[in-house]
Amino acid sequence: MLKLLYKVELGSDTEAYLVSDGTDFLFYSLDAIYIATVPPEWRLIEKLGTVERADDFERLTGRRPEVFIEDCRVCGLPALLLVEYDDGVCFDCQPEGGGEVMEYAN
Ligand SMILES: [Zn+2]
């Protein structure tokens, strides 16, 4: 699914990135860290281009986003994927026990 990547200004003078597919808005810091809560006032500064996958985001910004909406490689539905694991498979389609579960031995 084609998305637009913008540079935006959050609040008074904090710059960030915005990815929009027309329905969902994903904000990222300039370090490409996902921002869950943004101030109500933000404005578009510059359109950077179109992105379809996390690779495109990285190509345009030089940073790889930590999470990204991509079409799952198994079910084909758009899903918020953890790019860190980079398997392109949504949570529902992860093989049993394939998710990252941190367990610490005592
Ligand atoms: Zn899936």
Image (cartoon, helix red, strand yellow):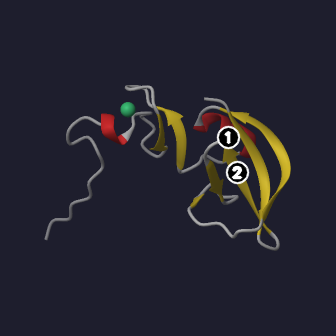
Q: Quadrant of residue 15?
A: bottom right
Q: Residue at x 62, y 43 (%)?
A: 23
* Circle 1: element type: loop
> In the rendered image of this protein, does residue 19 appear above or below residue 77?
below
> In the rendered image of this protein, does residue 106 appear above or below residue 49?
below
Q: Could you tell whether 31 is left or right of 6 in the image? A: left
> In the rendered image of this protein, does residue 71 appear above or below residue 26?
above
**Residue type, mark 1 in image:** Gly
- The quarter of the picture where the C terminus appears is bottom left
Q: Nearest the camera: 38 or 55?
A: 38
Q: Residue at x 66, y 30 (%)?
A: 2
Q: Residue at x 66, y 48 (%)?
A: 63
* Circle 2: element type: strand
- Give the residue furthest to the front: 23
Q: Which residue has dot 2 on it?
A: 18
**Residue 93, how many percent across, how many down?**
31, 34
Local packing at callout 2 (Cα closer than 10 Å; few below 14, some 14-19, many 20+) is: many
- Give the residue furthest to the right: 45
**Residue 24, how many percent across, how many down?**
60, 46
Q: Which residue has dot 1 on it?
A: 22
Q: Residue at x 64, y 56 (%)?
A: 28
Closer to the eye: label 2 or 1: 1
Local packing at callout 1 (Cα closer than 10 Å; few below 14, some 14-19, many 20+) is: few
Ligand number 1: quarter of image: top left
> What is the CA distance from the residue labelled 2 to the residue labelled 1?
11 Å
- Give the residue furthest to the bottom: 12
Q: Could you tell whether 15 is left or right of 80 in the image? A: right
> In the rendered image of this protein, does residue 78 appear above or below residue 7?
above
**Residue type, mark 2 in image:** Leu
Q: Nearest the camera: 40 or 97?
A: 40
